[in-house]
Image (tube, rainbow, N blue to C red):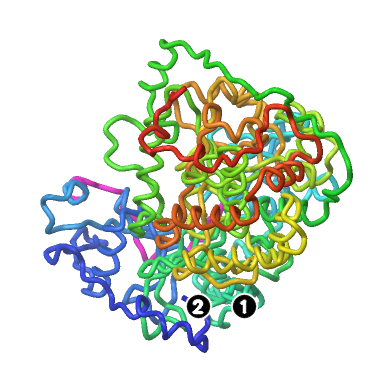
């Protein structure tokens, strides 16, 4: 699993010693169409590569591993939907087809398909694309070269569909505003001011692109030389970039020089996902690796192990990867806050109440529209698109199947959101166990991202958060947001611009050590100081025993190396707009999807980020919020209920009396206890059968 040939763990993993898989159907033949219209068979080795990826369910993949390509190192993209083989250096295409599997729907489609055929070996003629914007006079102006390249890169990655958000335009460095580029509408919009401009994609090189500034009179004779020169410059540039991977000891390690060059070439060619076996540490095992440059992950498709990666160097600095994400940010709030300072917390003096108010007619309407993540997918679609990483993993597919089944069950009265995390997992688990003991929280089914009431004193809901948001120069990285809020997405399957679930599920959305933070949390929950360190060590040992990755707290890595978790959050439709708002990256409000409750109640594909105010007054109550947690590590996922029971047992030794529980509750509430709280042990009352928990309305 380690991208480092000298790492002993590579040779200790039995799963990585698997040989290449035999195609499920030995009669399958893959063919390509030549310039004369004749069909030719791929070699046996290439047929194996094509069939393996086809059977995994991916729509396309990028590779340089074809047998005829060993001396050239050209990147090829295989598009199974349109049955094309595309040379990413020259943009030339060839038709391909799959034969010999009459029972396969895709095979029948392959025989009927008549995709466009472009000669694969025609030298590049200099044709490129650049981007322009329309000024106030109606004239077209070129984007700066680096901005044009940025837009073109995302255009190719998304196949000219959808949209993306960024703060990286060259003209925006002094302002750091969020811009949304919409390829369907061909527009660029400043989220903060609402100003919008029309954009367009034009054929031909950018005026400032020196690499394409050839003399017109000699273009025809020099096109091949120009292409070779460009390729040489591209490789020289790739050699200056450094790629790194997140190691078992919670540090960044360097890829081998040749591997780093390979990754950079794929990255520059907009190849995401990039699929290859051609890695220095993989010569013996020949495992298939998938690299996703949108969320910066590396996945071994044979073993399912996943690692974070990042890119350093170049004139534009670091691209991709992240040393901290918002779940780590919550821990930094715990670390810096003075929880012992006296303050009267505005917790409800009476137990919060909620009365369902959705009409039967509206419930039936939502049930007909179906699961939120599948809306707009079209009728009769055989299988949802889980993406190449999840689709290749048996456990991942099972988790996604269950989450969509939950959506179907709850879609009538509830909307769903997804939150991805990794390093903060043990902290979330401990908070859930504490809440089970003190507040009847159903910890067998979900973790609890926020427990302490004190931060919610000033920001109890989304309205209060939006009121403060303009005063935060660092937006949702601000400590006040991180103390009360979560970043999330409104679809399991949409490819949102930040942390899409099907890309980040295996590894989660953060890296970084959290040493000492668990002790801080326990102290804040009222655990006696003399017992804090010993209790924290027991919890870390317990995590290791049941398969939870504990590296962030100085413990061991989980067996699979998968540290990712997804929290599936169902919120009653009546409460959506009170606690959730639609957002762009960095938490900037997305007014076009506002009010969010109305947007989510309509048909059509759902996508986009959200920011959630995780007020315990609501999130502890299964009548208001229902949550389910899914862990990428199969061992921990299977053992989680046992782990929670053992955590609660550890807490029982500490919270064994009315006085000790009252002290813990005071720590959580920040001082004064609300009148509705009871000092009795609530652990037994927190238990609920899965059948009842899955009932949309058990009031």
Res 243 → quadrant:
bottom right
- Return the x and y of residue 70 as percentages of the image width and height: 38, 80
Q: Is residue 29 above or below residue 489?
A: below
Q: Residues within 10 Å of mark 2 (few under 14, many from 20)?
A: many
| Position of residue 281 measured from the top left corner of the image (x, y, whole percent) | 46, 83
Question: What is the count of numbered marks?
Answer: 2
The residue indicated by pointer 2 is: 2
Left or right of residue 313, residue 649 in this image: left
The span shown in magenta is 109-129
Residue 163 vs residue 631, the one in the foreground: 631
Give the spatial CA distance, label 1 vs label 2: 10 Å
Give yes or no for contact between labels 1 and 2 (Cβ–Cβ under 8 Å). Answer: yes
Q: Main secondary structure of the magenta part?
A: loop
Relative depth, front residue between 307 and 129: 307
Residue 530 in the image: x percent, y percent? 76, 64
Q: Secondary structure at mark 1?
A: strand
Task: Check residue 119 for magenta coloring.
Answer: yes
Q: Residue at x 70, y 29 (%)?
A: 462
The correct choice, above or below, for 360 with respect to 521 in the image is above
Q: Nearer the viewer, residue 277 or 533?
A: 533
Where disc 2 sits, the SS reads: loop
Q: Earlier in the sequence, mark 1 or mark 2?
A: 2
- Compared across the picture, whether 163 is left or right of 388 comes to right
Residue 565 in the image: x percent, y percent? 51, 53
- For mark 1, what is the residue? 253
In the rendered structure, does residue 626 fall within the stretch colored magenta? no
Work out whether residue 194 can be spotted: yes
Q: Which mark is residue 658?
A: none
Q: What's the residue at 66%, 52% (across, down)?
A: 327
Look at 63% across and 32% down and name the residue there. 582
Q: Place residue 592 in its image quadrant.
A: top right
């Amino acid at each position: 699993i380690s991208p480092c040939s000298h790492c002993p763990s590579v040779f200790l993993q039995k799963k990585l010693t698997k040989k290449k898989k035999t195609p499920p159907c030995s009669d399958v033949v893959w063919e390509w169409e030549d310039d004369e219209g004749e069909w030719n068979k791929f070699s046996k080795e290439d047929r194996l590569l094509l069939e393996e990826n086809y059977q995994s369910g991916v729509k396309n993949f990028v590779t340089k591993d074809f047998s005829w390509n060993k001396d050239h190192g050209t990147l090829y993209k295989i598009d199974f939907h349109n049955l094309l083989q595309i040379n990413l250096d020259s943009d030339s295409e060839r038709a391909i087809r799959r034969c010999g599997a009459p029972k396969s729907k895709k095979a029948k489609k392959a025989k009927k398909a008549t995709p466009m055929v472009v000669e694969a070996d025609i030298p590049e003629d200099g044709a490129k694309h650049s981007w322009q914007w329309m000024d106030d006079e109606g004239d077209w102006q070129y984007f700066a070269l680096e901005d044009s390249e940025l837009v073109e890169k995302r255009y190719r990655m998304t196949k000219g569909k959808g949209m993306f958000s960024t703060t990286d335009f060259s003209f925006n460095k002094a302002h750091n505003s969020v811009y949304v580029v919409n390829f369907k509408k061909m527009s660029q919009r400043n989220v903060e001011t609402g100003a919008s401009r029309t954009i367009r994609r034009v054929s031909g090189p950018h005026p400032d692109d020196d690499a394409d500034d050839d003399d017109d009179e000699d273009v025809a004779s020099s096109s091949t030389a120009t292409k070779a020169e460009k390729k040489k410059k591209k490789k020289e540039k790739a050699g200056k970039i450094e790629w790194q991977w997140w190691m078992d000891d919670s540090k960044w390690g360097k890829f081998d020089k040749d591997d780093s060059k390979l990754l950079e070439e794929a990255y520059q060619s907009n190849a995401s996902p990039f699929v290859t076996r051609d890695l220095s540490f993989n010569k013996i095992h020949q495992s298939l690796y998938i690299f996703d440059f949108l969320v910066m992950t590396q996945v071994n498709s044979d073993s399912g192990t996943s690692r974070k990666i990042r890119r350093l160097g170049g004139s534009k600095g670091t691209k991709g990867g992240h040393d901290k994400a918002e779940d780590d940010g919550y821990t930094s709030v715990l670390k810096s806050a003075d929880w012992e300072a006296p303050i009267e917390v505005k917790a409800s003096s009476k137990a919060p109440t909620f009365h369902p108010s959705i009409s039967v007619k509206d419930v039936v309407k939502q049930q007909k529209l179906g699961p939120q993540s599948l809306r707009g997918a079209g009728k009769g679609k055989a299988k949802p698109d889980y993406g190449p990483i999840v689709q290749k993993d048996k456990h991942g597919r099972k988790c996604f199947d269950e989450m969509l089944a939950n959506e179907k069950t709850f879609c009538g009265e509830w909307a769903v959101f997804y939150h991805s995390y990794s390093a903060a997992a043990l902290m979330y688990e401990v908070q859930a166990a504490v809440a089970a003991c003190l507040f009847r929280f159903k910890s067998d089914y979900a973790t609890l991202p926020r427990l302490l009431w004190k931060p919610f004193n000033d920001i109890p809901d989304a309205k209060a958060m939006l009121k403060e948001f303009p005063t935060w120069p660092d937006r949702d990285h601000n400590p006040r947001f991180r103390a009360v809020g979560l970043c999330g997405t409104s679809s399991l399957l949409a490819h949102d611009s930040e942390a899409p679930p099907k890309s980040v599920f295996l590894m989660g959305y953060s890296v970084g050590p959290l040493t000492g933070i668990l002790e801080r949390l326990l102290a804040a929950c009222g655990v006696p100081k003399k017992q804090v360190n010993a209790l924290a060590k027991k919890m870390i040992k317990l995590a290791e025993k049941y398969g939870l990755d504990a590296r962030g707290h100085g413990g061991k890595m989980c067996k699979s190396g998968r540290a990712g978790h997804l929290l599936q959050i169902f919120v009653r439709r009546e409460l959506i707009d009170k606690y959730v708002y639609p957002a762009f990256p960095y938490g900037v409000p997305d007014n076009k999807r506002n009010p969010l409750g109305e947007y989510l109640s309509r048909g059509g594909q759902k996508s986009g980020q959200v920011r959630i105010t995780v007020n315990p007054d609501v999130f502890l109550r299964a009548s208001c919020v229902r949550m389910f947690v899914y862990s990428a590590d199969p061992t921990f996922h299977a053992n989680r209920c046992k782990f929670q029971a053992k955590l609660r047992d550890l807490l029982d030794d500490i919270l064994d009396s009315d006085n000790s529980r009252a002290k813990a509750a005071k720590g959580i509430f920040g001082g004064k206890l609300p009148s509705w709280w009871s000092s009795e042990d609530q652990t037994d009352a927190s238990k609920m059968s899965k059948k009842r928990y899955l009932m949309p309305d058990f009031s």
